[in-house]
Amino acid sequence: MKNVLTDIPYTEGQMGKRQLVDEKHLLVMQVALKPAQQVPEHRANSNVHLLVVEGQITVTLAGQDVIAAKGTLVPVAFKTLMSIRNASTENASFLILKTPNPSEMTH
């Protein structure tokens, strides 16, 4: 059992992350962003949902910004161009839920 509200993996300089679940049909990771930190632009490598557990993040999906606060669930379709940043002055953390696990996806 893991508690996503404790031991949040904040780091200096770049995003912090930890893997919570790695199973055939599900990959769950936690990302922690201090103010001004970001997840670089990339394409979603599975069907993704982002669940904000602390603070607020700005998610850019195919060029459109979405602001997601604590408790918000953001769906991201497979292969969508995306980036995530903390544009606020407070720490932010979110879960990344990928179904199926990207290791099971056929590209």
Image: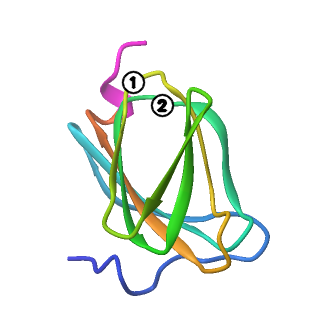
Q: What stretch is highlighted in magenta?
A: 102-107
Q: Which of marks 1 and 2 is nearer the N terminus?
A: 2
* Residue underneath mark 1: 78
| Residue at the image position 31 percent from the left and 67 percent from the top | 71
Q: Is residue 80 left or right of residue 101?
A: right
User: Helix, strand, or loop for circle 2?
Assistant: loop
Residue found at the very far top of the displayed protein: 107
Q: What residue type is labelled 1?
A: Phe
Q: In this view, does 66 lie to the left or right of 88?
A: left
User: Helix, strand, or loop for circle 1?
Assistant: loop
Residue 18 in picture, x, y percent from top left: 47, 65
38, 107: nearer the viewer:
38
In the rendered structure, does residue 68 fall within the stretch colored magenta?
A: no
68, 50: nearer the viewer:
68
**Quarter of the N terminus within the rendering:** bottom left
32, 107: nearer the viewer:
32
Contact, mark 1 vs mark 2 (Cβ under 8 Å): yes
* Residue underneath mark 2: 44
